[in-house]
Image: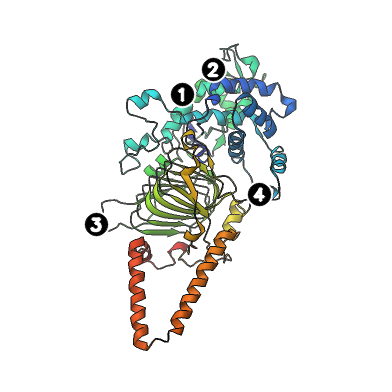
Amino acid sequence: MSIPVCHLLAFHVELIWSANTSKSLTNHRLCVPPPSKFSLHYLRKISTYVRTRATEGAYPRLYWSTWRHIACGKLQLAKDLAWLYFEIFDSLAVKTPEERLEWSEILSNCMTEDEVEKQRNQLSVDTLQFLLFLYIQQLNKVSLRTSLIGEEWPSPRNRSQSPDLTEKSSCHNKNWNDYSHQAFVYDHLSDLLELLLDPEQLTASFHSTHSSLVSQEAVVALSFLIEGTASRAGKIYPLHELALWQPLHAENGFSKISKTFSFYKLEAWLRACLTGNPFGTSACLKSGKKLAWAHQVEGTTKRAKIACNTHVAPRMHRMVVMSQVYKQTLAKSSDTLVGAHVKIHRCNESFIYLLSPLRSVTIEKCRNSTFVLGPVQTALHLHSCDNIKVIAVCHRLSISSTTGCVFHILTPTHPLILSGNQTVTFAPFHTHYPMLEDHMARTGLATVPNYWDKPMVVCRENSDTSVFRLLPPCEFYIFIIPFEMEGDTTEIPGGLPSAYQKALGQREQKIQIWQKIVKEARLTKDQRKQFQVLVENKFYEWLIHTGHRQQLDSLVPPAAGSKQAAG
């Protein structure tokens, strides 16, 4: 089964007049091919259908109950998949943390599936924007032609050996390449506009004509994808506000009499103005502010690259890009990270702590590393990673092409297992830091509901649930964050599942028994000294065998103490 979110909508397009601008949909696109029923043919039929059901919760707001009827009854999608698309799009809406927490509380109070469904039936989304959201999932379709000539291959484990994000081989990765997003919108602009046309503006074969008119409502919907500015350093506006600007009416074909736009003039104007995204990953790496958060490891040729655009980007476009952090511990709790989209790429044998409230996180092509994250308001996505441990509170987790990864998470949605994963382990969230609960409140994330142990397998190749396991309680340990910070959180938010708490209690009992045995042995001073040396040697051997020695050694950076997380 195919499906789209990384990322979760990874979309940036930009509109220029005498300058340039952009809009980001960076968090909510499922990074796998979409269902075949999301083709333009079916979406055009839905576009016509919903307008005839305006009084039944279909237009201009589409209610969950109506979408469930369309998706399950007409498109033959599974109910869980239908809800997944609907919920992902709904989470794109601007909501206060209080509103998000209120919804979590409502769900946590539901005792049955029927009660949950009753609450879902009260949710609605903008119909035209939702249709656009479904259509842009086509960005994930694999081209047979480019597969055959080597530019693209549908294997989830296709791994470029290029060490640099900016090299050509990396630019074929649609999750990171802003230019592929811009090209997609440019190449499919006619389809996007036709999808928004009123039925009477289309031919019998659902195509526009030279005289087709685009409503203001349709252009407002298109603002979901496109925004712009009238000057290079000017304020960013939604597309519909720019399109209604008087000096541009002659170019985009707006009529004050009919309150509509000429289809062909509007399309031509958009094509002439569409340009690259100044707040995307590529621009951040090329011209963003370089951050000296990591140090060069002696004896290696790899150089860490960390950059941000927070000094120039609007709040919703703030980004931090981190690449090639190697064999070190990096810990930050910084205003630069607050509300930022974080992109982590090709980090190896490192321990990375980002202890701030984050907007979204993408971790790609990383190996043998541990990531401890502050609360992630939207999506946390991993792709093509090996032997990674992730510890996080997040709204949604999705993974693709991972091997041997462990996820200690707290999440109100089902973790999404996409294609190409092997030996995935899920475990309860097991750490805390002093500001954690404050950061959770700022991102609208609660402790319930928590679906860490109920992942959703969404790809046909992974229909066998053996692709993942839940961590056995006997293998469970608490994770201690080794940095000093100010704050009020002193325990794991929400506590631990009873089986894991019991395992910790049993282990603590064994320690107490051992301490009692040692005490009752009445060792002499010399015997205690010999015993201490023996224990320390065994502990040292264990540190080396498990790889924990590197973690301890890396906690002492060249010119900073243990308070670096607060820097």
The x, y position of residue 59, in whole percent, is: 69, 27
Query: What separation in Å lies between label 4 and label 3 (alpha carbons)?
Result: 49 Å
What residue is shown at x 34% (from left), y 29% (from top)?
151
Query: Horizontal placement of 321 versus 267: left or right?
Result: left
In this figure, which residue is indicated by the disc labeled 3? Answer: 299
Q: Earlier in the sequence, mark 2 or mark 4?
A: 4
The image shows residue 472, relative to residue 197, as above or below, that is below
Residue that badge 4 annotates = 104
Sequence order check: which comes first, mark 2 or mark 1? 1
In the rendered structure, which amino acid carries the disc numbered 3?
A: Gly
Seen from the viewer's position, the closer of residues 397 and 229 is 397
Q: Amino acid at mark 4?
A: Ser
**Circle 2: element type:** helix
Q: Going 65% across and 32% down the picture, which residue do you hit?
A: 126
- The numbered mark at residue 187 is 1
For label 1, count other residues whose C-alpha is less than 10 Å away and answer few (under 14), some (14-19) or many (20+). Answer: few
Is residue 550 visible to the viewer in this orientation of the structure? no
